[in-house]
Amino acid sequence: MKRWLSKAEESLGNHSDRLNAINIFPVADGDTGTNLYLTMCAASRAAQDVDSTDLGELLAVAGRAAMEDARGNSGTLFAVFLSALAEPLHGANRLTARLLASALHRAQIRSWSALSDPVPGTMLSVLEAAARGAGETAGAPESDESNHFLAETLHAAVEHALQAVIQTESQLGALTEAKIVDAGGVGFLLIMDALRASSLGEELQDELLDGLHGYDIQAPHLHAGGDADGVEIMCTINLSPLDAATLRLHLDELGDSVIMSAVSEVPEGYRWRVHVHVPDPEPALRLIHEAGEPVNVTVAQLASGLPEAESGGAGAPATERSGDQRG
């Protein structure tokens, strides 16, 4: 698992420019690759310090670190995926086909439910396909706990994810018009291929992305010169489930791309990671502050080419910061 996160970090770093270039949904701010990479960096750093053979414990630590430092839509969804992936793996010190299928199924459910308005043709569809491929293979009558069936399951998950990436172009109007595949979906495909390679002691498949529309190195940066309206707000806040549901409802009324996912249990209920796109930050920030005491608050213009700003640490006072890169 440590090798997986490290290899995925390297792969996303190598592909971040191209992922940024085809990032036009949900907003064309050109930073999906950067956001996935930086969120993966946080997860990988945290995992390296874990001294345990419990796969669930290791991934839970990595997931919490990713959630606290999640960047944009894509990074937040990956953090949700990683945290959920850990749950069926607690107590296991060896990955098997059935455990992998169970973990991917759990991650699919959690990731779809984290969004107020999940949309097919995105990273969510690719995750769903990977889970389906793993489930079909691991659930075969002849499957067992052998490394052979783990390999079969990993290959099936990657192949289903690849086909889902190809299909994203026809699932979203913006992608169809631009003749490209979804950037977040490609990023998740890279993450899954890193899991396959790390688990089986194999190399990454350099040819995996060959032929994907928009992924030619000569293709233009589709977001270049374009600005998106509004801002992205992210924070972490302790709330009861009822208060969290109320906040989500109000944020849904103000904007879109609302993601809320529990990071960990606290005396007040749960520690939540909150993400939303809104035209005007003030009403949303007022609602968040009325609900509780947020930390790690960032406010970023939804526009390409903006420099990244530092955000407050987990225990830092709530501050609104502008100009950091999100999407």
Image (spheres, rainbow, N blue to C red):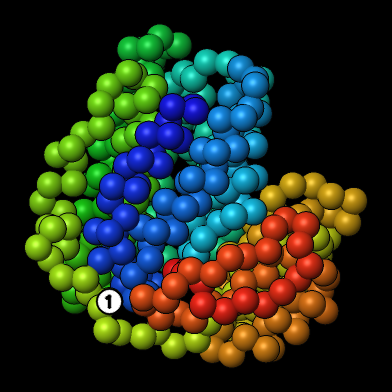
Residue sitting at 47 percent across and 18 percent down?
96
Question: In the figure, 228 relative to 244: above or below?
Answer: below
Q: Position of residue 121 (x, y in %)?
A: 33, 61
Residue drawn at (44%, 72%) of the image: 307
Total number of numbered discs in the rendering: 1
Amino acid at dot 1: His
> What residue is disc 1 on?
223
Q: Look at the numbered disc 1 and give the secondary structure of its residue.
A: loop
Residue drawn where x is 74% and y is 47% of the image:
264
Is residue 212 depicted above or below 107 in this figure?
below
Q: Is residue 142 above or below residue 310?
A: above
Query: What residue sits 12% from the left and 66% below the top?
Result: 219
Between 83 and 40, the one lying in front of the other is: 40
Let me know if residue 273 appears in the view: yes
* Nearer-the-camera pick, 255 or 324: 324
Q: Is residue 50 left or right of residue 30?
A: right
Residue lying at the far right in this picture: please name it. Answer: 267
Q: Is residue 278 left or right of residue 121?
A: right
